[in-house]
């Protein structure tokens, strides 16, 4: 299961989501076994995290495939936002996981128990770190190629796992020296990291669901590429949004009023091609404006973005 130079962005995303499910299955099994042997709060926290990761990975597995379905009669703009809903669901799962871990750690503070089989617990966590590093590498490659918000959310989970596993190792190691309180404190610290990660995922999903614009740098790049022709007099009213693996771009381009319809059409096609080279997953709509025609048009949002992406 490896990427090749010929792998498309969609293939990379599908492969990364499948690998995520496989790794999560392995980690849940290993940590569940060690929890029975050790009764470690740090392992419990790590197991809860991996269990929620498994569920989230399954959701991601199906979401990235559904998001890439072709537009149809019911969804003429595609199904890309399925990825954002997937990320939103993942954020909710992580919040729930953190709450359960904190409750377990609180109970452990009231009724502390020594950590058994600390060597086995640490060994499983090291294996978990190695598997997670490999998965994150795959996800990073898929993310760079596709910009998938679902893969980004899944990757954030596993980056959090790396940190929580290191904290768990430290907590178990100190607890093995006769200070079981540190195992519980490690569990609390990991739960707080889960909350932080969930907030980041929630923000990213909300940005897509609320049709947040691409970054100012991306908008400026779109304007530069589209206007890179001496016959294009101005590019303005640029509007962008992300929908899962796709980017929607709208803009107005000012042309000489003396151009024929065919000549204007060809100029717009060339502008579209330049933008598509930089944003190959984009759906682009360009409206031509004849120079000197300042009649307002464009419907309810004709005034354009408040910040003036023009």
Image: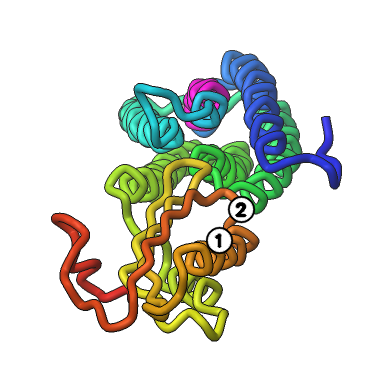
User: Where is residue 127 drawn, in percent x and y?
Assistant: 75, 33
- Mark seen at residue 112: none
Q: Quadrant of residue 273?
A: bottom right
From the viewer's side, name the closer residue of 107 and 31: 31
Tell me the SS state at disc 1: helix
From the viewer's side, name the closer residue of 249 and 1: 249
Residue at (19%, 63%) from the top-left corner? 297
Tell me the SS state at disc 2: loop
The mark closer to the camera, 1 or 2, is: 1
Tell me: residue 210, above or below residue 86: below
Find disc 2 in the rendering and name its residue: 280
Residue at (24%, 67%) from the top-left corner? 305
User: Where is residue 62 drawn, in percent x and y?
Assistant: 53, 21
Find disc 1 in the rendering and name its residue: 269
Highlighted range, magenta: 45-62
Asked if residue 54 lies in the magenta stretch, the reply is yes
Secondary structure that dominates the magenta span:
helix
């Amino acid at each position: 299961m490896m990427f090749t130079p010929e792998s498309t962005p969609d293939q990379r995303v599908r492969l990364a989501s499948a690998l995520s499910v496989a790794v999560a299955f392995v980690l849940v099994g290993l940590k569940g076994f060690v929890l029975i042997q050790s009764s470690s709060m740090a392992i419990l926290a790590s197991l809860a995290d991996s269990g929620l990761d498994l569920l989230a990975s399954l959701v991601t597995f199906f979401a990235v495939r559904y998001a890439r379905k072709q537009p149809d009669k019911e969804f003429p703009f595609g199904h890309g936002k399925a990825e954002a809903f997937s990320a939103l669901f993942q954020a909710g799962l992580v919040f729930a996981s953190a709450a359960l871990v904190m409750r377990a750690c609180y109970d452990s503070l009231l009724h502390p128990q020594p950590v058994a089989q600390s060597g086995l617990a640490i060994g499983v966590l090291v294996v978990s770190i190695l598997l997670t590093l490999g998965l994150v590498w795959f996800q990073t490659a898929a993310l760079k190629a596709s910009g998938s918000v679902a893969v980004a959310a899944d990757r954030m989970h596993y980056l959090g796992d790396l940190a929580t596993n290191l904290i768990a190792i430290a907590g178990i190691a100190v607890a093995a020296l006769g200070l079981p309180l540190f195992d519980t404190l490690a569990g609390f610290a990991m739960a707080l990291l889960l909350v932080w990660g969930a907030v980041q995922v929630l923000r990213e999903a909300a940005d897509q669901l609320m049709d947040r614009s691409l970054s100012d740098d991306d908008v400026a790049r779109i304007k530069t590429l589209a206007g890179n022709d001496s016959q294009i007099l101005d590019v303005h009213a640029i509007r962008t949004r992300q929908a899962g693996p796709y980017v929607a771009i709208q803009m107005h381009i000012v042309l000489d009023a003396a151009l024929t319809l065919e000549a204007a059409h060809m100029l717009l096609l060339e502008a579209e091609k330049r933008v598509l080279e930089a944003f190959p997953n984009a759906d682009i709509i360009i409206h031509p404006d004849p120079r000197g025609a300042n009649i307002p048009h464009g419907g309810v949002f004709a005034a354009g973005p408040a910040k003036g992406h023009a």
